[in-house]
């Protein structure tokens, strides 16, 4: 093994995904140990995924930062590429982390950003120019942070902004300008989530989004401003969009809006349209215009029927890779879908509505020659 070129060893290690296996590799010899470190420490999650005591979290963050400052430096400093931060970090703590970790970071997830603002997010953009994925939850970010990201992170592809009320309707304008100036190829995956709080976005936001090369877009919001967003989204066209998730659409999502949108986006492969006023007419349009759907999310659509769903599954066999249909809260009875796998207690009289159709149920429906219900 000592005679193998380092690039061959690295090529082998790339195919090892389990942390326990990588740890075992570090015990082989010094050469393999050194080659394994970049793979062993390329991902690190700090803190608990469920919020805990604030004082305990503050201690955890301080301990983590102190560990990184020790000499010789911890391998994380040089090798980590994906960081998930679940504790409640402050601006000062995040800036300290930025000063310690090298520029190789590509993926950052900040789960509790209540004390995170432009003060640390702008330096983050400058310090980690290779950033490709950024997830912010409850951060006090403003337009200044978006400008910094667009200017200093040309490889940014995935941007998720959840409960960030200080942003503006022009959130994505800097990325549009950067793309027009030839800086990077543009953000391709966007998630916007408000959880019922203030919503900074409007139809101008959608106009900017429509100028990005979006392949995946998710939006969830409530209230009148969300209605404006949903209406604008359903009248926009993204030629490269393959994944779409719209939640809590409400009255804006009727057949008259949904069918033209579906017709204009035949390349969609994963579609989630929750709580709309769609009828079987929209289901028929999906089968007619969409080329190859793999996932269909229809939760909360109470105006679709058993006949419409079964017809969609049975007659559109060009959806070769359809693996899941989410029917939660559509109020469709198990009696009409004997192929469906029951969720919960089968003896519970209240548990009589279908949750989903999995691959086995879909295949069975297609093989059976039931008359239309």
Image (tube, grey):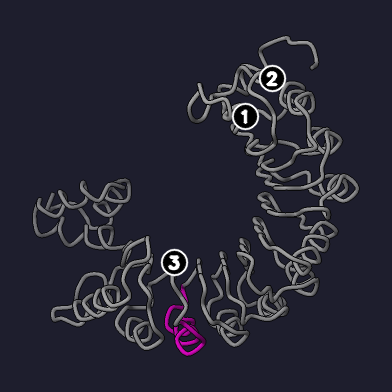
Position of residue 136 measured from the top left corner of the image (x, y, whole percent): 51, 71
- Say if mark 3 contacts mark 1, CB within 8 Å: no
Identify the residue at image location x=33%, y=75%. Answer: 54
Viewport quadrant of the C terminus = top right
Q: Nearer the viewer, mark 3 or mark 1?
A: 1
Vertical arrangement, residue 168 with respect to residue 28, above or below: below
Mark 2 / mark 3, whichever is N-terminal? 3
Among the 4 quarters of the image, the one containing residue 103: bottom left
Which numbered disc covers residue 354? Answer: 1
Q: Nearer the viewer, residue 133 or 137?
A: 137
Q: Secondary structure at mark 2?
A: helix
Main SS, magenta residues: helix
- Say if mark 1 contacts mark 2, CB within 8 Å: yes
Identify the residue at image location x=21%, y=77%. Answer: 63
Position of residue 343 measured from the top left corner of the image (x, y, whole percent): 51, 30
Q: Nearer the viewer, residue 20 or 219?
A: 219
**Span highlighted in magenta in the image:** 116-130
Q: Secondary structure at mark 3?
A: strand
Left or right: residue 157 versus residue 312 is left
Left or right: residue 31 versus residue 86 is left
Position of residue 212 measured from the top left corner of the image (x, y, whole percent): 71, 67
Residue 122 located within the stretch drawn in magenta: yes
Left or right: residue 255 versus residue 1 is right
Residue at image mark 2 = 336
């Amino acid at each position: 093994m000592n005679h193998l070129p380092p690039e061959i060893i690295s090529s082998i290690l790339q195919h090892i995904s389990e942390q326990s296996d990588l740890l075992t590799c570090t015990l082989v010899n010094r050469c393999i140990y050194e080659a394994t470190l970049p793979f062993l420490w390329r991902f690190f999650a700090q803190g608990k995924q469920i919020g805990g005591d604030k004082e305990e979290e503050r201690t955890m963050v301080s301990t983590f930062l102190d560990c990184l400052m020790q000499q010789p430096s911890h391998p994380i400093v040089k090798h980590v590429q994906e960081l998930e931060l679940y504790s409640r970090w402050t601006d000062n703590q995040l800036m300290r982390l930025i000063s310690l970790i090298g520029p190789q970071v590509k993926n950052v997830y900040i789960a509790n950003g209540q004390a995170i603002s432009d003060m640390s997010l702008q330096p983050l953009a400058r310090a980690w120019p290779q950033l490709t994925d950024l997830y912010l939850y409850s951060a006090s970010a403003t337009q200044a942070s978006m400008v910094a990201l667009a200017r200093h992170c040309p490889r940014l592809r995935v941007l998720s902004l959840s409960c960030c009320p200080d942003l503006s309707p022009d959130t994505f304008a800097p990325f549009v300008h950067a793309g027009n100036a030839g800086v990077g190829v543009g953000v391709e995956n966007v998630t916007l989530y408000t959880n019922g709080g203030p919503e900074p976005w409007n139809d101008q936001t959608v106009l900017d989004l429509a100028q990005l090369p979006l392949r995946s877009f998710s939006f969830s919001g409530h209230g009148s401003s969300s209605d404006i967003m949903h209406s604008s989204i359903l009248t926009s066209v993204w030629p490269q969009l393959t994944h779409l998730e719209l939640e809590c659409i409400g009255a804006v999502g009727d057949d008259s809006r949904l069918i033209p949108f579906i017709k204009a986006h035949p390349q969609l492969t994963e579609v989630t349209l929750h709580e709309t006023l769609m009828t079987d007419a929209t289901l028929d349009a999906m089968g007619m215009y969409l080329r190859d759907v793999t996932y269909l999310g229809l939760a909360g659509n109470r105006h679709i029927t058993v006949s419409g769903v079964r017809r969609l599954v049975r007659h559109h066999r060009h959806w070769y890779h359809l693996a899941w249909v989410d029917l939660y809260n559509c109020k469709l009875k198990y009696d009409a879908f004997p192929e469906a796998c029951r969720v919960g207690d089968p003896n519970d009289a209240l548990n009589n509505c279908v949750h989903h159709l999995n691959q086995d149920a879909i295949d069975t429906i297609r093989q059976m020659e039931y008359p239309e219900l």
